[in-house]
Image (tube, grey):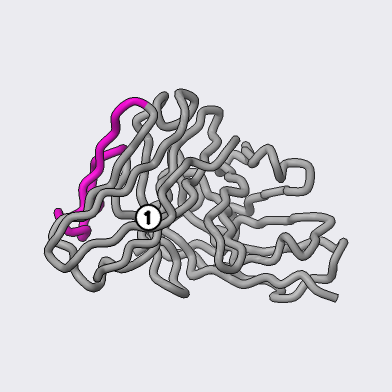
Amino acid sequence: QSALTQPPSASGSPGQSVTISCTGTSSDVGGYNYVSWYQQHPGKAPKLMIYEVSKRPSGVPDRFSGSKSGNTASLTVSGLQAEDEADYYCSSYAGSNMGVFGTGTKVTVL
Amino acid sequence: QVQLQESGPGLVKPSETLSLTCTVSGYSISSNYYWGWIRQPPGKGLEWIGSIYHSGSTYYNPSLKSRVTISVDTSKNQFSLKMSSVTAADTAVYYCARDIMSTRDYWGQGTLVTVSS
């Protein structure tokens, strides 16, 4: 069970968009529509931002969107704001009631 | 509102057993969700440790399975983590979370466990 691959960092200016990829295999990302994304600010617990590939929990701005193609899922943050600067982690169901996280991406708002 | 709170020793000696409890409020642990443990070493990423269903069925990360036991106490609305033979590599913030199909929608605040003599 290997961690899903994410770029270490991503950045954008306020108002711009940033897209983070999350690459797995056919045994996790590609095999199930149970990809979720989490935002984590320093010293805080992760917060669910996207679940089941593209669904947003109540209270999450619609600037956050998710998608998936094959073994790669993506999170897009549109209209970047200063408070979006954080670490982002993807997660996928991997069958047999097991899960795997991504390696994490630090998003910087320039 | 669903709330989770981790509790347990913040310092564990090498080779000993780490024990943590997660107390759930605002939701019955006997309802239809799994309950899981996740950890994060300082400055590093998240790692799923394992999950338990209220029936007691457990699922573990294969890389930790030999050292981990997760149990549930529905009468106290709690679930617990035990990790044996700990080393410095097990130093991390440990989180508990509500879990369904690897989607964790509610998390505890996390508790730092340091393994040191």
Quarter where residue A45 is shown: bottom left
Quarter where residue A53 is shown: top left
Q: Nearer the viewer, residue A73 or B72?
A: A73
Q: Is residue A54 magenta?
A: yes
Q: Chain of mark 1?
A: A
Name the secondary structure under disc 1: strand
Kindly identify the residue that appears in the image at 54 percent across and 33 percent down: A97
Kindly identify the residue that appears in the image at 78 percent across and 42 percent down: B66
According to the picture, the residue beneath numbered tag 1 turns out to be A38
Q: Nearer the viewer, residue A4 or B46?
A: A4
Q: Is residue A64 magenta?
A: yes
Q: Is residue A73 left or right of residue A23?
A: left
State the predominant SS element of the stretch in magenta.
loop
The magenta region covers A53-70
B74 is higher (above) or lower (below) than B44: above
Q: Nearer the viewer, residue A98 or B19?
A: A98
The kind of residue on which mark 1 rests is Tyr
